[in-house]
Amino acid sequence: MTEIITVGNYKGGVGKSSITEIFAFLLDKEHNKKVLLVDTDPQMNLSDKVRRTFKAEAKPKKQLMQAIEDQTIEDALVTINDNIDLLVGDWQIEKFHQHVSNLPKQAQFYLLYTLTKDLVKNYDYVLIDTRPSTDIMTNNAVSMSDYVLIVAKTEQDSFTSSQRYYKYLSEMAQYNENLKLLGVIQYLVNTRGSTDRKIMQDFADLFEDDVLKSVVRSSERVKTWGYHGITTEYAHDKKTMKMYKNALKEVLDKLRQPNKQ
Ligand SMILES: Nc1ncnc2c1ncn2[C@@H]1O[C@H](COP(=O)(O)OP(=O)(O)O)[C@@H](O)[C@H]1O
Ligand SMILES: [Mg+2]
């Protein structure tokens, strides 16, 4: 069965694209799972990261917006390796809003679902990276997802954005009644900071059991990966990767709980 997961938050710079890439990397290397990555952010950070890590040219036959307009979304798909495929990001996706405005109101939320519903069946996991806003493309991502993973920094602004994003998700339930919150993963800004601890408490109060026990710490290594692509051969890589492995393990355990709300 395919599990479709939107990675989101209203806020940018909280680690959404990084965690999406690293989870895909681990799902491939450690779990031998088939993953479709969908880059819906016109900034295309996820596509760039994946290109760097997997040394893939990742040039699709058509740009994503064009493929959507032509109703042949597979033309924006590239094979990264045996397990990972990527629907490559496109700065022109800004035009998506205009494109769907011609459709009836309801259909505007389901265009991405309609175009990908056969494609997604080929994968164990579909990870959709979203831009830090709730535009119509993000609505489409959420409408086709089984789960949303909220990525949040331990900063006041990020907490407030997560709160608003959660409210947005509850409003989206009218378009996707099966939507579930997979969890909130905290990206610790300052591992020893008292503000971080206070904000972690705020997250715990608001999201309760939905807050993942694993946290991602601020790590120079992740910044280096952002620059050169993910590496695993250095001592620092292993320590850093361990936090993401723990987080992914918790996510996979949550997915296996049959009654997850
Ligand atoms: N654990 C981490 N430690 C340090 N820097 C990180 C970490 N995770 C992500 N970053 C950096 O933070 C910045 C924003 O991350 P990114 O994943 O692009 O966020 P978003 O997709 O939410 O905008 C990037 O420069 C990235 O390299
Ligand atoms: Mg991003």
Image (spheres, rainbow, N blue to C red):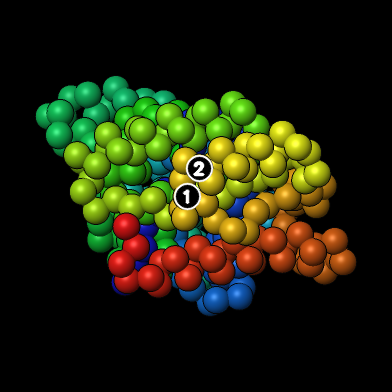
Quarter the C terminus occupies: bottom left
- Badge 2 element: helix
Tell me the kind of residue under disc 1: Glu
Q: Residue at x 54, y 66 (%)?
A: 250
Residue 11: name its quadrant. Answer: top right
For disc 2, the marked residue is 205
Residue under label 1: 208
Q: Nearer the viewer, residue 15 or 211?
A: 211
Q: Are marks 2 and 1 in contact (CB under 8 Å)?
A: yes
On residue 180, which mark appears? none
**Amino acid type for the residue under numbered disc 2:** Asp
Q: Nearer the viewer, residue 50 or 55?
A: 50
Query: Which of the two residues, 57 or 256, is positioned nearer the viewer here?
Result: 256
- Name the quadrant of the N terminus: bottom left
Ligand 1 contact, mark 2 (Cβ < 8 Å): no
Quadrant of the rendered image containing residue 97 = top left
Up/down of 258 relative to 140, above or below: below
Instruction: Quote the CA–CA distance across marks 2 and 1.
Output: 6 Å
Q: Residue at x 59, y 58 (%)?
A: 213
CA neighbours of label 1 inside 10 A, class few (<14), some (14 to 19), many (20+): few
Find residue 38 and report its horizontal and vertical position in percent: 44, 49
- The CB of the residue at mark 1 lies under 8 Å from ligand 1: no
Using the rendered image of the protein, determine whether residue 89 is visible from the camera's viewpoint. no
Q: Is residue 163 above or below residue 233?
A: above
Residue furthest right in the image: 235
Q: Is residue 30 left or right of residue 36?
A: right
Which residue appears farthest toward the left when viewing the image?
104
Q: Residues within 10 Å of mark 2 (few under 14, many from 20)?
A: few
